[in-house]
């Protein structure tokens, strides 16, 4: 017996394309066995019942007696093999058919040949061969039955053992056998073509399904498929990565109670088709609900979008607009500013100026420098190119960064201390942008973080399954009323600051799909935490 992966049996060795589903094949064999058992019992009962008049055994009673008993014995053996499945389906079906054709031919001879009418039972055997085995094998069994019927007539004619012989009847019966087998062969051939076509369609569907699965799994947009009962059917890699999950959740409620509630509200009011989630690491995710057009059960698709990624595109658009704006007004501002600064410098060199006038020139110089710094920051913001992200090993990179930073700003190395909890930590970010962010945070820590009370700490660790860099200082922290405006442009509490440093840092973080936030440590210390993209997850 030969089976394929779909539990299909191919019983005919000379028609390997003709297959029967396994369950259906064994059911057909069971029906054929029941027919055989009924027929064998009928022969035995008629033999011992001696109902007169009867043609059964009229020509050769011993042959009929032994053939019918042997017929029953083989049927019982077949039943045992069928129940225990000790032999393959192909063997059992062929065994039943061969024994059926041979023994029915012997019984027909014992009853007086083809005139007895027993030969018509061979037509049932040939038809059974076409159903249980099929293909070219049906023609083979029909040919054997036809030859045995013809051989019986030839033997009777040569030996004069039967009073009347009929080659015409034998030929017609053989033709009937072949016709039946031919019909089953045509049906089998059609079945082979349909099976081949179905296999091609199945392969095409499997390829499309695999392609769709690949596309869904590699989308940057998170996709979750659920049903009306909120049972999650599918969640792609992007969705699991956004939600910081290792495996597919069972229910929407396992992701967020608010998400499950918003999904129920959307089912009652289709206008409420969006939800917004805030994860433990302050990552914000926008979720859109959509009904999938399926022909059967209702399924729903949840589209997850990382707001940080959305803000990245918005930020790039803002930067492009700001670049065009600043390019047109840069000369208009800097040229008169240079003239004012130069005039103030010349006035300060006048020896006849009183101390009051000298103080006024210092105010002109300091404010000119401040305005010039604002222009430089704006130009730097507008000229910024897109991020060129690469894989960074944080430990060696941060070690080298601190060495370079302390040399550039002429501070002692003991002013900073580096802690790395887990190794290796890898991030996916533009190294130039990362340096610019840390430069601003470390400079602010030197100015406002009271480094004389203890070292400024750079702490690298895993938080919410993402690599993080934390800059912790000893300052009093940021007032609660200022927290909501912390990353807004031109917001500052210092008379010397421009209010663009943290705004630029947050924009650079969003360009690299990172997140910058302000937190208080357990010791009430001031901390800026930068959540980075994990390089290991970005390439899976």
Image (cartoon, rainbow, N blue to C red):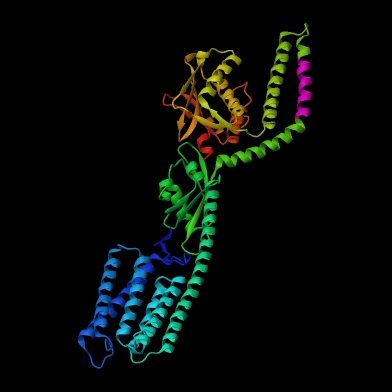
Q: Nearer the viewer, residue 164 or 375?
A: 164
For the N terminus, the quadrant is bottom left
Q: Quadrant of residue 65?
A: bottom left
Is residue 47 left or right of 260 when viewed as pictured? Answer: left
Kindly identify the residue that appears in the image at 49 percent across and 31 percent down: 467
Q: Nearer the viewer, residue 151 or 396?
A: 151
Q: Residue furthest top?
A: 351
Kindly identify the residue that appears in the image at 54 percent across and 58 percent down: 204
Is residue 42 left or right of 261 when viewed as pictured? Answer: left
Q: Is residue 486 visible?
A: no
Q: Position of residue 239 (x, y in %)?
A: 50, 45
Using the image, determine if residue 536 lies above or below residue 77: above
Using the image, determine if residue 41 lies above or below residue 382: below
Q: Position of residue 466 (x, y in %)?
A: 48, 34
Q: Is residue 145 visible?
A: yes
Magenta-highlighted residues = 330-344
Q: Nearer the viewer, residue 427 or 171?
A: 171
**Most frequent secondary structure within the magenta stretch:** helix
Q: Position of residue 504 (x, y in %)?
A: 62, 30
Whether 334 is among the magenta residues is yes
Is residue 321 left or right of 128 when viewed as pictured? Answer: right
Kindly identify the residue that appears in the image at 28 percent across and 72 percent down: 74
Q: Quadrant of residue 464?
A: top left
Q: Position of residue 490 (x, y in %)?
A: 63, 29
Using the image, determine if residue 237 lies above or below residue 74: above
Whether 83 is among the magenta residues is no
Kindly identify the residue that appears in the image at 54 percent across and 21 percent down: 445
């Amino acid at each position: 017996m030969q089976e394929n992966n779909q539990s299909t049996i191919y019983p005919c060795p000379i028609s390997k394309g003709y297959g029967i589903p396994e369950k259906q094949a064994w059911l057909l064999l069971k029906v054929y066995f029941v027919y055989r058992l009924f027929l064998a019992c009928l022969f035995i009962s008629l033999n011992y019942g001696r109902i007169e008049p009867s043609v059964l055994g009229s020509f050769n009673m011993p042959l009929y007696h032994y053939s019918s008993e042997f017929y029953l014995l083989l049927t019982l053996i077949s039943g045992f093999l069928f129940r225990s499945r000790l032999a393959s389906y192909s063997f059992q079906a062929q065994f039943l058919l061969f024994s059926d054709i041979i023994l029915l031919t012997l019984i027909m001879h014992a009853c007086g040949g083809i005139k007895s009418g027993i030969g018509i039972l061979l037509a049932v055997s040939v038809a059974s061969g076409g159903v249980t085995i099929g293909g070219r094998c049906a023609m083979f069994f029909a040919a054997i039955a036809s030859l045995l019927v013809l051989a019986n007539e030839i033997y009777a004619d040569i030996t004069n053992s039967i009073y009347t012989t009929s080659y015409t009847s034998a030929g017609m019966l053989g033709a009937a056998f072949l016709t039946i087998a031919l019909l089953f062969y045509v049906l089998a051939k059609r079945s082979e073509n349909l099976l081949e076509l179905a296999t091609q369609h199945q392969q095409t569907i499997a390829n499309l399904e695999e392609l769709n699965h690949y596309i869904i799994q590699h989308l940057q947009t998170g996709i979750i498929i659920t049903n009306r009962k909120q049972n999650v059917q599918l969640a792609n890699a992007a969705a699991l990565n956004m939600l910081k999950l290792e495996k597919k959740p069972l229910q929407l409620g396992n992701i967020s109670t608010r998400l499950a509630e918003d999904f129920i509200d959307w089912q009652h009011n289709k206008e409420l088709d969006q939800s917004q989630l805030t994860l433990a690491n302050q990552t914000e995710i926008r979720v859109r609900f959509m009904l999938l057009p399926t022909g059967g059960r209702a399924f729903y698709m949840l589209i997850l979008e990382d707001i940080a990624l959305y803000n990245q595109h918005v930020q790039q658009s803002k930067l492009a607009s700001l670049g065009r704006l600043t390019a047109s007004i840069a000369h208009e501002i800097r040229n008169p500013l240079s003239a004012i600064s130069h005039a103030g410098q010349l006035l300060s060199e006048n020896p006849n100026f009183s101390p009051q006038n000298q103080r006024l020139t210092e105010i002109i110089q300091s404010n000119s420098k401040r305005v010039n710094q604002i222009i430089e920051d704006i130009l730097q913001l507008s000229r910024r190119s897109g991020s060129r992200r690469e894989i960074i090993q944080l430990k060696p990179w941060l070690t080298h960064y601190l060495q370079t930073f302390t040399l550039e700003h002429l501070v002692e190395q003991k002013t900073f201390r580096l802690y790395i909890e887990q190794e290796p930590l890898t991030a996916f970010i533009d190294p130039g942008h990362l340096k610019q962010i840390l430069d601003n945070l470390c400079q602010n820590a030197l100015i406002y973080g009271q480094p004389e009370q203890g070292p400024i700490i750079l702490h690298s660790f895993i938080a919410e399954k993402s690599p993080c860099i934390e800059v912790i200082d000893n300052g009093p922290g940021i007032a609660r009323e200022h927290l909501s405006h912390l990353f807004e442009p031109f917001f500052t509490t210092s008379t010397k600051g421009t209010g663009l440093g943290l705004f630029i840092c947050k924009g650079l973080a969003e360009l690299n799909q990172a997140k910058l936030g302000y937190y208080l440590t357990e010791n009430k210390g001031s901390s800026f935490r930068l959540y980075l993209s994990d390089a290991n997850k970005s390439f899976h």
